[in-house]
Amino acid sequence: MCSLYVGVLMLMIGGILSLIFEKSEKMAGLFSIVFGAFAAFFIFSFIKIPLMTDKTITDILNMSMPIGIVRIEVDGLSAFFIMLIIVLAFIAMLYSHGYFLHFYNKGMSCGKHFFFFNILIVSMILVVSVRNAIAFLILWEIMSISSFFVMSFHHNAEDMREVAIKYIIAMHVGAFFLIVAFLIAGIEGGTFDFEGIERVMKAGGVLAQVVFFLFFIGFAFKIGLIPFHTWLPYAYPAAPGGTAALMAGVMKAVGVYCLLRIVGLSGRPEVWSGYVILAISVGSAVFGILTAISHNDVKKVLSFSSVENAGIIGIAIAAGMLGLAYDLPEMAFFGFAGALFHVLNHAIFKGLLFFGINSVYTQVYTTDMDKLGGVIKKMPMTAYLFLVGSLAIVGLPPFNGFISKFLIYNSFFIITSQKAAGLLMGVSVLTLAMLALTGALALAAFTKTFGTVFLGEPRNNKIVFKSESNAWMTFPMLVLSLMCLFIGLCPHGVTIMLRGPLKSMGVPYYEHNLETATMVSGVFLIFIFMLALVLFIKFLVLKNKKIQKAATWGCGYGAVSNKMQYTGASFSEPLTRLSKPVLSMDNNIKKPNGLFPVKALSYSVKAGDLIERLFIDKLWHAFRWLLDRFSWIQSGYTGHYLLYILLTIVAMAIAAMWRLGL
Amino acid sequence: MMDAAVRYVLMIVVALLMPGLINKVKALWGGRQGASILQPIYDICRLFHKSQVISETTSPIFRVAPSINLVASLCAGLVVPVAGKESLIYFNGDFVFFAYILALGRFFTVLGALDTGSSFEGMGASREVTFSALIEPAFFIIMGAMAMLTGYTSFSQIFSLIPGLLQNIKINDAGVSIAELIRLWAHSELLVAAVCGNIVFLIMILVEASRLPVDDPTTHLELTMIHEVMVLDNSGIDLAFIQWASALKIGMLGTLIVALILPAALYMWSAVMLYLFLMLLVAITIGSIESVMARLRMTHVPQFVLGASSIALIVLAILLLGHKQ
C-alpha cells in the first residue's frame, strides 16, 4: 500500500512544483513529467500483485470526524483501472507538454494547468481505491472540480468559459443522484463503508432497485450515456492538449469502474434492470454515432463517438448483467470482459484521436473539417497515426478495437449453445444487428473525418501549415498506435489482466473462451503476411514500369478548384437525410429574391444534438422558470444571508433534538 | 486441411468466372452473343502488364488501398465454407470477422476515393458507406438467427447444420444423395427461413458488389453510380486488384448462398458438382435480375436495401415462434 501512497505523493509534488515554477513555463511541464514517471513506476510496482493474482490489498485510515474510518482497498478491479489511469495520464502529460510549447509566452497559465492535471489524476486514482461513501463523494467532487479547471485553460474566450460552467453544472446534477444514493445506502445499510451498499443491494426489493438506478444515473453522467451526455460534446472539444484524452478516455473509465463496482456489490441483478440498461446503451450507441456523422467539427465527431462507445461499453455491461440474471455465466463473463477490454481500448484510441486533432489544431487553429484537407502531405506522421486510431475505433482488423468488440459480440451469441429464454434470444439477435449497424456507421463517420481532414487538397486557401508537430506530441501518439496494434495482434497481453477484475466482481473466468480472441489475432497475422506478399508482388510488377503523374481525372473538365471537393457535410448527406428524425439539423437557406437576385445566396447546415434540444433545453427552461419564483430570496443584502444561515442552524438543531427525542 | 485449401482455391477460381458468367447471361437476355466468359480474367491479366497513372493529389494511402481491399477479400474468403465442407479457418463468431474484414477493405476503398479530391469519387464514397451501413444489420440478424437455430456460431458449423437440421439427418461419412436432399428440403418448415436467408444474401451481393438495381457496373460517368466511380483514378495493377476483389465478393457471397442449401453430408464429388451448378444458378439469377430490372432511383435504394433487414426479421420471427422454452 505504501508504494501507492508514494506514487500519489509524487504526483502531488509534481503538481505543486509546476505551480511554483509557473513563471518558467517549460520547467512546469518537465517537473510534472519527471514526477509523473516516478509515480508511474511506484504505482506499477504496487498494482502488479492485485492485478495478476487474486490478492486484495487493504488499508484502514482513521480520518477525523466527518469522514470517519476509510477503507482503502485495491483489488483486481481497482488495480485494472489504476493501471489504465496512470498509463494514459502519463502519456497525456507528455503530449500536453508538447502541446503547450505552442502556447508559451502567450499569457496562458500552463503551470496551473499542470497542477490541476496532477490533482485530477490523483483524485481518479483514489476514487477507484476508496471504499467509503463520504470519502468517495469528496474525491468525486475534487475530480469534477479539478477537471473543470483543467478544461478551462482557454478561459480568455467567453464561449469556453460558458462550456466549462455547463460542464460543472452537469457534473453536479450527476453528483446529486450519487449523494442521494449513497445516503440511502449508508443509512439503510448502517455504515458508510461500501459494505452498507452491499447489504442494501443484496437485501433486494424495491429499495435496492431504486438505489441501483440512482447510482446508474449518477455514473451515467460521467460515462456519457443518453440522455445524460449533453455536457460531453461541449466539454471534450474545449479541453486542451492531452486533457481531452484524459477526460474522454480515462474519466469515462472511472465512471465505468464505479458502475462495475456497484454491479459487483449487487449480487444477482434483476432481469428487467439488465434490459433497461441495454436499451439505454443501444440508444446511446446508435444515437451517438448518427449525431457524430452529422457534425463537421472533428472534435464534435470524436465527442459524439464517445457517446457511441459509452453505449457499446453499456451494452457489454448489460450483457454481463443479463448473463448473471439468467444464470448464464459464460454470457456474463464475455459481457464484463468485453466491457473492461473496451474501456481500455477506448481510452487508447480515443486518446490517440484527440491527440491527432489537437496536433492539427496547433498548426491551423481550426478543427472544422470543411476548411481542412490534404493535411497528410504537411503532417504525415500525425496523419498515419490518426489513421491507426480511426481504424481501431471503427473496430477493424488487425487493431485492438476489433478484439473488444468481438468479445462483446461473443457475449450475445454464446447463449446459442445454451438454453436461453426466447426473449433473451430475440433481444440478443437484435442487439447484434444494432452493434453491427453502429460499426458500419462508425466507418462512415471516420472515413468522413479522416478523408476530409487529411486527404485531398485543402478546402480553404487561407489555411497555411507550418510543419509537422514536435516530437513531444508525435511520440505519445506513436506509443498509443503501437498499443492499438499490439493489443490487436496479441490480445493475450490484456486478457491475462482481466482475471483479477472479474474475480473481484464475482464473475467466473473462462480462460478457454478467450481462445477465440487469440485465434482471431492469428488470422490477423495471416492478413498482414498476405498484405506484405501482395505489396511485394505489386512492387515487382511495377518495378520496371514508369509511373505517370497527372491531375485527378475531372471528367474532361480541367479547371478543377479545390473548393469543388466533396466536403464533410456533403459526404454525410445521404445518411443524415435518412436519419433526420433523430438528428437536429438547422438548414439555413438564403433563397434568391426577385427576378434578378443581387444579394449573395447561401446554404448552410448546422448540426446539433436532438436530445439536448428536445429534452435538456426544455427541462432547463422549466427549471429556470421554477427558480425564478424564488428569486426574491436572493436580496443581495449580507444581513439577509446571515439570517438564512442562522435559520438553517436553528432548523438543524431542532431537527436533531426532535430526532434524539429531547 | 489440404482438402479445405483446394476448396478455397476452387472458390477463388469460380469467383473469377462469376462476372464473365453474369455478363454472358446479360448478353443472352439482350439477344447478343456477348464476350467470352473468360473476358474479365483477360482484363485482369492485361491490367497486370500495364503501367500506372497516378493523380498528383494523392498520398500513399491511394496506392495501398486496392491491395488492402484485395487482401481483405481474400482473408474473408478463408472463413467461408465451400462445397459443403468446413472452411480453411473457422472459429466461434467467424462471421463477425468476415463482416469486419470486408469493412476494412471498404474503409480503404473509400479513403482511396477521397484521396483523389475528386467530387465524383467523394460522391461514390458517400453512397458506398451509406448503403453498406444499411445492409449490415440484415446480415447480422440472419447470421444471429441462424446461430440461435443451430447452436453454433461459425459459418462452417452453422451451414453444415442448417440443412441437416431439417429432418434430423445425422451427419455421417456415408452421406445422402441429392434426390434425398431435395425431398428433405421440400418437406421442411425451415424452407421459409432458408429462402429468406438466401434473398438477404442475394441483396447483399447486389449491394456489396454493386450490381444492378443498386448500382450500374457498366456506367462510368453518370451521377448515379457508386462503386465504379470510386475507382475512377485507379489504373494498372491497382485496377486489376479492385476488379479481382469485386469478383471475389460476388463469389464469396454466392458461396454463402450455396452453403445455406448444400449440406455437409453429401459425397465429395456430388458436393463439388452441386456447388458448381448452384453457383451457375446464382450467376444466372444475378444476370437475369440485371437484365429485367432498371436501376433504382438513388432515393429509392435505401428502401430496397432496408428491405433486406425486414426479410431478415422474418427469419428471426420464425426462430422465436419455433422456440420452445
Image (cartoon, rainbow, N blue to C red):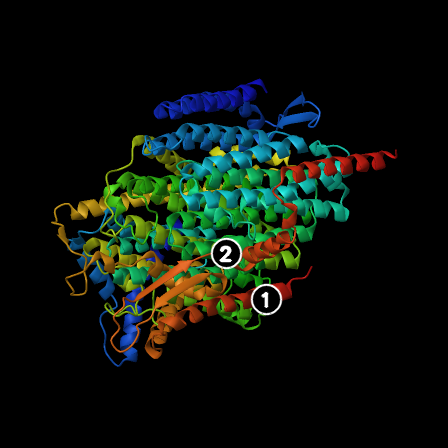
Circle 1: element type: helix
- Residue occupying image coordinates x 71% and y 48%: A210
> Going by the image, does A474 lie left or right of A651?
left
The answer to whether one can see residue A213 in this image is yes
Label 2's element? helix
Q: Nearer the viewer, residue A206 or A187?
A: A187
What's under tag 2, amino acid-wise? Answer: Val
Of all residues, the one furthest to the right in this rendering is A662
Q: Depth check: give the residue in front, A628 or A461.
A: A628
Q: Is residue A126 above or below residue A635?
A: above
The C terminus of chain A sits in image quarter: top right
A63 relative to B275, above or below: above
Question: How packed is label 1: few (under 14 Cα within 10 Å), some, or many (20 or more)?
Answer: some
Q: Is residue B219 toward the left or the right of residue A489 in the image?
A: left
In the displayed structure, does residue A603 sit left or right of residue B309? Answer: left
Residue position for label 1: B317
Q: Look at mark 2 in the image and give the residue it sits on.
A: A286
- Above-or-below relation of A525 to A285: above
Alpha carbon of mark 1 to alpha carbon of mark 2: how far?
Answer: 23 Å
